[in-house]
Amino acid sequence: MSKGGCVINYVIGDATQPNARPAIIAHICNTAGGWGKGFSGAISVRWAKPEKFYRDMTHRRLGMCDFIDVRKGITVANMIAQRRYSKPGKPAIDYAALETCLRHVALYAVNNNYSVHMPRIGAGLAGGDWAIIELVIVRTLCDSGIAATVYDLA
């Protein structure tokens, strides 16, 4: 997608194996303490630290974003942007919290010269609308000059 000079790079592949380094792998977490379904489960298959960090949190507030170094050149961003769990017709994503989190990611990426990699965050279990999420990515990452790659599984 290209808007205002920004390009989101869409690729087929596994977002836990970014195609460039150094990289931030961004994903959405919920406020309820649930971990293991969706992309968080894929992260746990590769690294234990992001799940442990999330589970050790005593408060999970929308808009919080934590950065966990998992190996040289790869940092996972646990972004709290989902209220509890989705229900039919009632998405759990909080778009304002997602924007706040991605602004934190943008600042971290700029300060450390990282690119950002992610699955289609918020459009799965959180029930979000990808067209809205895509615009948030453009406003927060692309407009800050940060390379953003979105991965779809084959």
Image (tube, helix red, strand yellow):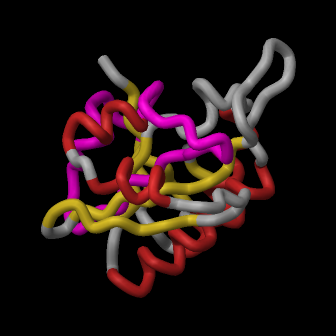
Q: Nearer the viewer, residue 22 or 11?
A: 22
- The residue depicted at 58 percent of the width and 42 percent of the height is 33
- The residue depicted at 63 percent of the width and 65 percent of the height is 64
Q: Does residue 36 lie above or below 142 as drawn? A: above
Among all residues in the image, which is located at the extreme right? 89
Residue 82 seen anywhere in this rendered image of the structure: yes
Taking the magenta stretch, the answer to whether it contains residue 30 is yes
Q: Nearer the viewer, residue 121 or 49?
A: 49
86 left or right of 39 in image: right
Q: Which is the main secondary structure of the residues drawn in magenta?
A: loop
Work out which quarter of the rendered image holds the N terminus and state it.
Answer: top right
Taking the magenta stretch, the answer to whether it contains residue 36 is yes
Numbered range of the magenta stretch:
10-39
Question: Residue 148: x percent and y percent?
Answer: 44, 55
Question: Residue 92: x percent and y percent?
Answer: 76, 34
94 left or right of 15 in image: right
Asked where in the image residue 90 lies, by quadrant, the reply is: top right
Asked where in the image residue 100 lies, by quadrant, the reply is: bottom right
127 left or right of 6 in image: right
Among all residues in the image, which is located at the extreme left? 72
Q: Does residue 48 lie above or below 145 as drawn? A: above
